[in-house]
Image (cartoon, rainbow, N blue to C red):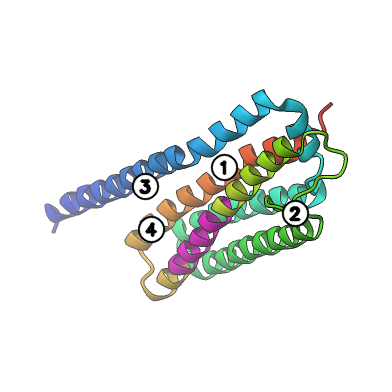
């Protein structure tokens, strides 16, 4: 019994390391996935700075700011859930994950409201696109193409994050223990990654034209 315990602890440590390595490798591939989006934004910002600034002023700053606060709060909730689960408070950890899921859904709802407003104001790229006050409509349209692609891609990743949180919540209820804790840690890394992507998107899309 005494000889087996250290081996078991070593196995657990190796499994945890493999889980973390796998998630970091996945997040590395995700960085390369978002890279072209940020490159397209920087290229347009350099080539048509006035058009991008005018288009940035057309975004809904209040919705963007509220969503930033929502995401940051949700990241705190993930950290709290992991801490509670690590201490064996599985019920409270599940309630923390409930809050994370609700905040994620709130982010998507606000983003959906923004999309509807953009549609009504003819800001969706296409034949009817028109940004009031913009001299370079083509440059402004390119900004909104990047805006919709980047935010929709982010929303898809957030939806996957919500699914991961629901999976972890279910596992905490049915099979609480170290394996579930490792899953929650990996899911938390993914959630924080999605949060960090938004931290870059928010100033680029909402604040660029308002800083002048």
Residue located at (31% from left, 46% from top)? 22
Q: Which comes sooner in the sequence, label 4 or label 1?
A: 4
How far apart, in angstroms, are the residues tagged by discs 4 and 3? 10 Å
Could you tell me if the residues under marks 2 and 4 are in contact, i.e. CB atoms within 8 Å?
Answer: no
Residue 161 is a magenta residue: yes
Viewer-side label of 3, 1? 1
The residue positioned farthest toward the top in the image shown:
46
Q: Which comes sooner in the sequence, label 3 or label 1?
A: 3
Q: Which residues are magenta?
A: 154-168
Could you tell whether 39 is left or right of 140 in the image? left
How far apart, in angstroms, are the residues tagged by discs 2 and 3? 42 Å
**Which secondary structure lies at badge 4?**
helix
The residue carrying mark 3 is: 23
The residue carrying mark 1 is: 197
The residue carrying mark 4 is: 183
On residue 175, the disc is: none
Residue 53 at what x, y percent from top left?
Answer: 77, 32
Residue located at (86% from left, 44% from top)? 132
> Looking at the rendering, which quadrant does residue 103 occupy?
bottom right
Question: Who is closer to the viewer here, 94 or 198?
Answer: 198
Look at the image and tell me whether residue 208 can be seen: no
Question: Who is closer to the viewer here, 54 or 15?
Answer: 54
Q: Quadrant of the N terminus?
A: bottom left
Could you tell whether 25 is left or right of 162 in the image? left
Q: Which comes sooner in the sequence, label 4 or label 3?
A: 3
**Which secondary structure lies at badge 2?**
loop
The residue carrying mark 2 is: 128
Residue 196 is a magenta residue: no
Viewer-side label of 2, 4? 2
Q: Which comes sooner in the sequence, label 2 or label 4?
A: 2
How far apart, in angstroms, are the residues tagged by discs 1 and 2? 30 Å
How far apart, in angstroms, are the residues tagged by discs 3 and 1? 16 Å
């Amino acid at each position: 019994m005494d000889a087996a315990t250290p081996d078991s602890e070593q196995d657990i440590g190796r499994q945890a390391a493999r889980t973390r390595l796998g998630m970091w490798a996945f997040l590395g591939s995700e960085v390369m996935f978002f890279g072209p989006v940020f490159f397209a934004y920087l290229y347009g910002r350099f080539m048509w700075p006035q058009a991008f600034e005018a288009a940035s002023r057309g975004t809904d700053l209040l919705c963007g700011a509220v969503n930033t606060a929502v995401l940051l709060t949700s990241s705190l909730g993930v950290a709290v859930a992991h801490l509670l689960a690590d201490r064996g408070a599985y019920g409270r950890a599940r309630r923390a994950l409930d809050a994370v899921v609700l905040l994620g859904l709130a982010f998507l709802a606000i983003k959906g409201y923004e999309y509807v407003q953009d549609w009504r104001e003819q800001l969706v790229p296409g034949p009817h696109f028109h940004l009031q006050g913009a001299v370079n409509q083509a440059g402004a349209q390119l900004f909104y193409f990047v805006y919709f692609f980047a935010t929709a891609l982010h929303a898809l990743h957030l939806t996957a994050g919500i699914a991961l949180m629901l999976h972890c919540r279910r596992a905490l209820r049915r099979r609480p223990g170290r394996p579930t804790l490792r899953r929650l840690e990996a899911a938390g890394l993914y959630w924080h990654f999605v949060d960090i992507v938004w931290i870059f998107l928010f100033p680029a899309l909402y604040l660029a034209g308002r800083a002048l």
